[in-house]
Image: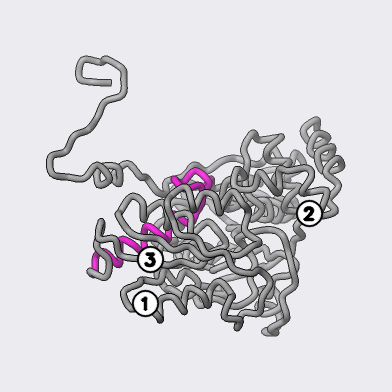
Amino acid sequence: RDREGKAGVFTCMVPHVPMVAVLVAWISVGNTPLLDLSALAPDLPKGVRVLGKAEFSNPSGSVKDRIVEYILDEQERIGRLTRFSGQTIVASSSGNTATSLAMFSALRGYRCIAITNRGTSKEKVQQLYAYGAEVVVTASGVPTDSPVHYQNVEKQLVEENPGYFGLNQYDSPLNPEAYYATLGPELWAQTNGKITHLVAAGSTGGTVSGTARFLKKKNQAIQVIMPDPHGSIFYDWWAHRKLVKPTSFEVEGVGKDSIPQALDLSLIDVMPRFSDEQAFATCRTIARRMGMMVGGSAGGNVHAALTLARKLKGPATVVAILCDSGTKYLSKIFNDEWMASKGYDVAAMDASAANRSAQ
């Protein structure tokens, strides 16, 4: 509304400032809602709550907006990057970090080269193109020392082009630092310091490590749960210090075939395993019961949170990170044909969701 109370759409004109610069101010990352998911489990013990941190409500649709904004702000502060310079930024990603970088690059006047692999959903790849990124899609399931592994492609491009800046999300200390500075304080404030359990799966490990470090500094008794998909190497390294060969899994954005430097496993108290089917069934249940769509990593987190919460004694506040939006997986998790092609019993999943909603 204008000063006279008249409603409408109004143009903001700032002399000598590019309109893109004005738009940057309208991008708001963080301060996402904390939602009560307790209704998903009517059998929760008295005094136990399960909450979900709605990171899918960030501008590009995922938690990764936090690290991209943080890293870019820091590089701009020290003079390594300059807005509207056309400098090239490179990021290897399973989709969400690259998408966030593509969005911020469009806003801040950078050239973005996004490297992902064939396991990434087509929605996330199309989102990269929509923001104007140059997209490199590499083979999936290749060894970590392969030159076509998406992380190695980023390293190679940066090495061969001295003017390029590599986001390096898997090993950058700025990754967990971003969550220590933002997500951890938000969870503490939104729960009035009553959070007892954090549930956050990892890929780079930045989300769980930075958030856990902040929360444990506030209260050492807070338990940190890092669900890990079957096929990832994290569990065996955390539990047995044994590096195993990764096997395939369908859930995107969590689990890994290597150990990133951004991940601090000393902060993890429990690491339950989950299957693709458990994660995807939970996603579909959340859509039908709670009216919101989340991705497979969030499904894994919520599955682990509900399983844990049923065993607790109140009072307890369990917070699961809802990492990204389910609209990024319409061709997979929410596509009955794709689900059936992977051997999942969609009818049974949806019937189970309906039965729980009737309890």
State the residue in front, 349 or 195. 349
The magenta segment is: 54-78
| Secondary structure under the numbered disc 1 in the rendered image | loop
Q: Earlier in the sequence, mark 2 or mark 3?
A: 3
Compared with 148, 280 (above or below) is above
Kindly indicate whether the residue at mark 2 contacts the one at mark 1 (C-beta within 8 angstroms): no
Please tell me the numbered disc located at residue 281: none
Number of numbered callouts drawn: 3
Compared with 143, 28 (above or below) is above
The image position of residue 353, as x and y in percent, is 79, 38
Query: On the picture, is 73 further left or further right than 300?
Result: left
- The residue indicated by pointer 2 is 277
- Nearer the observer: mark 1 or 2; the answer is 1
The residue depicted at 45 percent of the width and 54 percent of the height is 100
The image position of residue 103, as x and y in percent, is 41, 51
The residue depicted at 28 percent of the width and 21 percent of the height is 1
Kindly indicate whether the residue at mark 3 contacts the one at mark 2 (C-beta within 8 angstroms): no
The residue depicted at 42 percent of the width and 46 percent of the height is 31
Dot 1 crowding, Cα within 10 Å, few <14, some 14–19, many 20+: few
Q: Would residue 358 be seen by someone viewing this image from the given angle?
A: yes
Q: CA distance from mark 1 to mark 2?
A: 42 Å
- The residue indicated by pointer 1 is 161
| Secondary structure under the numbered disc 3 in the rendered image | strand
Dot 2 crowding, Cα within 10 Å, few <14, some 14–19, many 20+: many
Q: CA distance from mark 3 to mark 1?
A: 11 Å
Q: How is the image coloured?
A: one colour
Which residue sits furthest left?
15
Please tell me the numbered disc located at residue 89: 3
Q: Earlier in the sequence, mark 3 or mark 1?
A: 3
Q: Earlier in the sequence, mark 1 or mark 2?
A: 1
